[in-house]
Amino acid sequence: MTSPAFKDHMGRPIVVVTGMGVVSSLGEGLEENWNKLSSGISGIHKIERFATNELSTLICGSVDFIGAEANSIVDRTYILAENTTVEALADAEINGEFNGPLFLAAPPAEPDWEDRFELAGELRADQTEGSVYRKFLDILHDKPKRSFFESSQFGMVSERLADKFGTRGLPVTLSTACASGATAIQLGVEAIQQGRTDRALAVATDGSVNAEQVIRFSLLSALSTQNDPPEKASKPFSKDRDGFVIAEGAATLVLESLEAATARGAKIHGVIKGCGEKADHFHRTRSSPDAAPAMAAIHAALDDAGLKPEDIGYINAHGTSTPENDKMEYLALSNVFGESLNSIPVSSNKSMIGHTLTAAGAVEAIFSVMTIKTGTLPPTINYDNPDPAIELDVVPNVKREMQVTSILSNSFGFGGQNACLVISASPT
Amino acid sequence: MNTKSKNDVVITGIGLVTSLGVGVKAHEELLNGSNPITPVINDQLIPPYPLHPMPEIDWNDQIPRRGDQRQMGNWQKLGVYAAGLALDDAGFKDDADGCSTMDMIVCGGGGERDSDVDTIIIEESLKRNDKDVLLNEKLRTEVRPTLFLSQLSNLLAGNISIVHKVTGSSRTFMGEEGSGVSAIETAVARIQAGSSTHCLVGGAFVAEREDYLYVIEAINALETSPARPVWQRDDERGIVFGSAGVFLVLESKEHAIARGAKIYVTIDGVLGDAGSRDEASFAKRMAKLNSDLNISDEANTLVLSGTSGRSQAMQFEKDYLKAHHSNGTVRTTSAIFGHALEAQFPLGLALGAIALKNGSQFAPFAKDMDAPMSQNATKAVITSVGHHRSEGLATLSKA
C-alpha cells in the first residue's frame, strides 16, 4: 500500500525532479548557467553563424560551442539534447538504461538550405522543366542520398536519444511551439500520475537559429532590431521593448514518482506540482486581447496543483519582450492574482538568454527549480525604462535573495498554445 | 497504481477524407458492399510515382471563411476539414461548451513549402558563389509570412482552434507513423485516467507534394508505376502515398452516454514501441505489444494492417500477421487508400470503427493477404508499422 505521503491532493503520485541538465547561450551545464543567470549576465551576441546581409535583426542567442556549430538544425538540436541529458542522468545518478518513456520537445525537421544547395550541384543541364523539387526527385531517383532522408525525419532526434539513453517504448516528439518545453514536462508528469511508469525523461531542445528562421520571425515583426549592443536588446516589460531575441538551448529533466525516488534514495530537487493548458482561438500568432486563455491556463495549473493564487511566491514569466506578449501576460497575471500581484516578484529569464523557443518551457522550469533551491530570484535585466502600463515587481536588473516555496512558470506560443507549470519545493 | 477502475473509451465521431471521398457515409457505401473496391490512383500527377490524390473537396463546407482558407496550405486545410467532419459526426459542431472543453492531439507532419520561392533560390544559386548572401536576399523579398505559418507543425491544431473553436487543450505530436500511435495512446490514457472526458485526435497527409516525396525518394522507397500489389512489393521500394484527413472524437463512455451520443466502438487498448529493425527485435517487440494488449487469435477479429508497403518492414509485419492472426481476417489499408503516414493509424481506427459498428464484411482490399470474411467481426486490431521506425497496435471491440 502506497503511503499517503507519496500522493497529491487528488490521490495521484507526487512527481519530483531528480535530475537536471541545461545548455543555453550562457554556457554548458546547470552550474555555469545558473551562476551567470543569477548574476544578470546576458548570452545574447552578434550573429556570426551565417551572413546577415538584408537582415534587420543581427543578434541572437545561438549556442556556438559543444559542437553545436554543426550545419544542420537536426544535428544541432540533437547535440544540445544529448548534452543536457547526459548531465541530467549523471545528476540523477542513473546509470545504464533509463528504462522509462521519453518525451521530446523538438523543432519541426526539414532539410537545411546547405543540403538543398548540395543537391542543386547535381542538377543536370537537361533538367529544365518543373519545380526544383520535381528536379530533386529525378536526381534522388537515380542517386539516393540516405543522409538527406535522415535529416528530414521528425522521429530522428528522439530515436537517437532513445538509443543512446535506453528509454522505453515509443518516444514522443512534440511541438506546441513556444510552449513545447512545458508540454514535454506535462506529458512526463501525466505518464507517472497515470501509473504507466515510475520515471520519465522530459527533454526540450532547439538548435534552429539559421537565416531562414530569423527572416521568418522578422516577417512576422516578432524580433527585436535593437542590435547594438546585443546584450541590451531583450528587455521584457520595458517601455521600449520591440521584440524577442531568437535563441537556442536545451533542458532535460528526470521526472520520478516521489515514491520511486525515495525508494532509491535519490536527491529531490523539487516537485512538479501542477500543469495547466488552454488553447486560444483568437489568431494564429496573437493572443486573445482579453488574455482569457492565458488566465485559464494559469487557473488550470493552480487547480491541478491544489494551490490558490496567494500560495505562489514568484512567477517565472514567459516575458518574451515583444510588445504584445508582455502586455497580455501582465493582463492575465493581474486578473488572476489581483492585488496580491503587488507582492509577487515576476522576472523573465529571456532578458538574459533570449527566447529558446521549443526549449524555453523546460529551460525555465529548471531555472524555477533552482530559484526555489537557492533562494535567489534571477533578475529581469535591461529594465531601465519601465513600461508604466505594466506594474510588476520584475526584480529589476539585480538578483534578489528570497525564499519561495511555489513558483508559476508560464509558456505561451503561436497557434494558440498556452501551458503553465506550478513548481514547488521538495517535500523532504 | 491507481485502484479505481479505468474509464471506458469510445469513439463517437469520425471525420474521414480520402481519395475515395468525403465523409463516413461515402466510405460506408463503398465499404459495406460485397464488391471489390476500386482504388483511385493517379500516376500522372508526379510521374513515375503512383499516388492516391485528395478527392474533390468544397473547403467552404467546413472552413467557411475565405480568410482562414488563405492562411493554410492543403495539408492544414485537409486536417481542419476532417476535424470539422468529426465534430459534426459526434454532434459537437454547434456545441460551444463541448468544443471549449475538448482536448486535442494532432499527429502532424510539416506543412508545405513555397515551391516557387525555393525554385527561384536554387536556380539563382547555380549562377552565384555567394549562396548565403543570395539566400537572405531572396527569402527577405519572396517569402510570404502566411506561408511560414502554413509550414509549422502545430498550426494544424492552431487552425482547428480558430476554425472550430476546439480549445480545451492543444498538443501536436510529430514523428511520421509513430506520431499517430502516440496521439491516440495519449488521448486514451488521459480519458481512462479521468483527466480528460473528450478529445479530438487525428491528422492529415497530402500525397501530391513534390516537396515531400523527394525526401522519401532519397532512400528510393517510393513505388514506381505500375504499382505492384502491396504484399508483392518484396524486394525494394514499395510506398504508394495516399492523401487522407482523419480525425476521431474519443470520449469516456460515461460522457458519451450522458449527452446521448452515438457510439461506434470501444477502444480497449493502444500501445506503441520502437527499436532496432532487425528481424528478431522486431518480432519480439510485436509479440510483446500483442500480449500486453491481451490480443488473442480469433476468427471474430478484423485486422487492419497499416503497412506502408516498404519492403523489409512489410515482410516483418507479414510474419507477425501469420504468427498472431492466423484465424482473423486481414484488410490492408494501403491497398485501397495508399499510405497516409501520420494519418495512417487514425485511418485504421476509423475503418475498424465503421466495420464493427455496421457489422460489415469489407470485401478484400489486397491480393494475397486479404481473405473473404467468414463472419461479422466483433473485434478489430489495427497495426502500425512505420516505413522506417516505430510500431503500434490498437484493439477495438463492438460497443
Image (tube, rainbow, N blue to C red):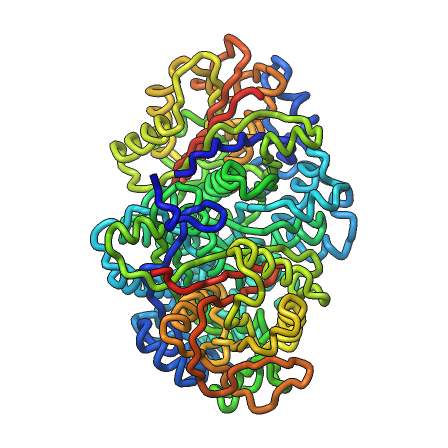
Residue at 40% across, 81% down: A38
Q: Residue furthest front?
A: A4
Residue B358 shown left or right of residue B301 in the figure: right
Residue at 50% across, 34% down: B225
Near-viewer residue (B355 or B70): B355
Residue A182: x, y in percent?
Answer: 48, 60
Residue B208: x, y in percent?
Answer: 58, 44
Residue at 58% across, 25% down: B265
Q: Residue furthest left?
A: A96
Asked if residue A134 can be seen in this view, the reply is: yes
State the image quarter where residue B279 is shown: top left
Say which quadrant the N terminus of chain B sits in.
Answer: top left
State the image quarter where residue B67 is shown: bottom right
Residue A265: x, y in percent?
Answer: 24, 55
Q: Residue furthest top?
A: B374
**A62 is higher (above) or lower (below) than A307:** below
**A396 is higher (above) or lower (below) than A427:** below
**B345 is higher (above) or lower (below) than A110:** above
**A194 is higher (above) or lower (below) than A232:** above
Say which quadrant the C terminus of chain B sits in.
Answer: top right
Near-viewer residue (B123 or A6): A6
Asked if residue A141 can be seen in this view, the reply is: no
Residue B9: x, y in percent?
Answer: 55, 32
Q: How many numbered dots are placed on residues in this image?
A: 0
